[in-house]
Amino acid sequence: MEWIDFALYFLIALVVLCLYRVIKGPTVADRVVAIEILGIIVVGICVILSISTGRAFMIDIGIAWIILSFIGTLTMAKYLGRRRLDE
Amino acid sequence: MNNLISNIFIGIGLIFSLMGCIGLIRLPDIYNRLQAATKCVTLGACCILVSLVIRYGFNDSGIKGLFAIPVLFFTSTVGAHSLIRGAHIFGIKLWEKSIIDDYEADGYGHSSSTENQKELSDEIS
């Protein structure tokens, strides 16, 4: 097995670990944290796929995923802090 | 030679990501989990991006990877900080063996925030 393929399968296994925390997490903040970590790992998967297939556009998917995950996390933080979105 | 260094950086990134996920599974409460997971996994993903830059140099793929590193660093840390602040205000309990809570002691925690919320609702009404 190539080293790049091994890295890809390894990161997919880590995504499964994060999904365990998403399903089991006792509070809502646990689930949001697990989703954020899952997004960062997906960026790693996109980079490994870009190396494996030799196409540059996978990095764009990773950057878009980082920024959307950031917006979602900030929205959930505002919601948990019981503040309005324009404050 | 570049491929060898790039593979070594991928291995470092995988190890850090594994440590972060083990912390996410094993640690007792939300604050410990976030401080273990966010730092380790961010550093792991940045190591993988550095391996991309080393492997391809400064062509289009490498420049995109170089741009993604500071974006990943700043968005991850700012998001984690604001999320943990929101969780503390929301009133999620610390682990029962935690011995110190400076944020609560300074008056920004759960109890004082509910008082502030009452004052705010009084002002609105």
Image: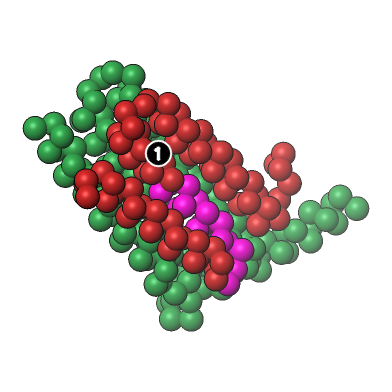
Q: Secondary structure at mark 1?
A: helix
Residue B70's x, y, as percent? 37, 33
Please check the rendered image and state whether residue A29 is part of the magenta-colored stretch, yes or no: yes
Amino acid residing under circle 1: Cys
Residue B51's x, y, as percent? 24, 36
Q: Nearer the viewer, residue A62 or B98?
A: A62
> Is residue B110 rendered to the left or right of residue A11?
right
Q: Is residue B97 above or below residue A15?
A: below
- The answer to whether one can see residue B107 in this image is no
Please check the rendered image and state whether residue B92 is part of the magenta-colored stretch, yes or no: no
Q: Nearer the viewer, residue B88 or A64?
A: A64
Residue B27's x, y, as percent? 40, 71
State the hue of chain B: green
> Is residue B28 rendered to the left or right of residue A74?
left
Q: Nearer the viewer, residue B72 or B32?
A: B72
State the hue of chain A: red
Residue appearing at x 22%, y 46% in the figure: A2
Q: Which residues are magenta?
A: A26-41
Residue under circle 1?
A46
> Is residue A25 rendered to the left or right of residue A50?
right
Q: How many labels sit on residues?
A: 1
Subunit ID for the residue under disc 1: A
Q: Residues within 10 Å of mark 1 (few under 14, many from 20)?
A: many
Residue B96's x, y, as percent? 48, 81
Magenta span: helix, strand or loop, mainly?
Answer: helix
Q: Is residue B35 above or below residue B55?
A: below
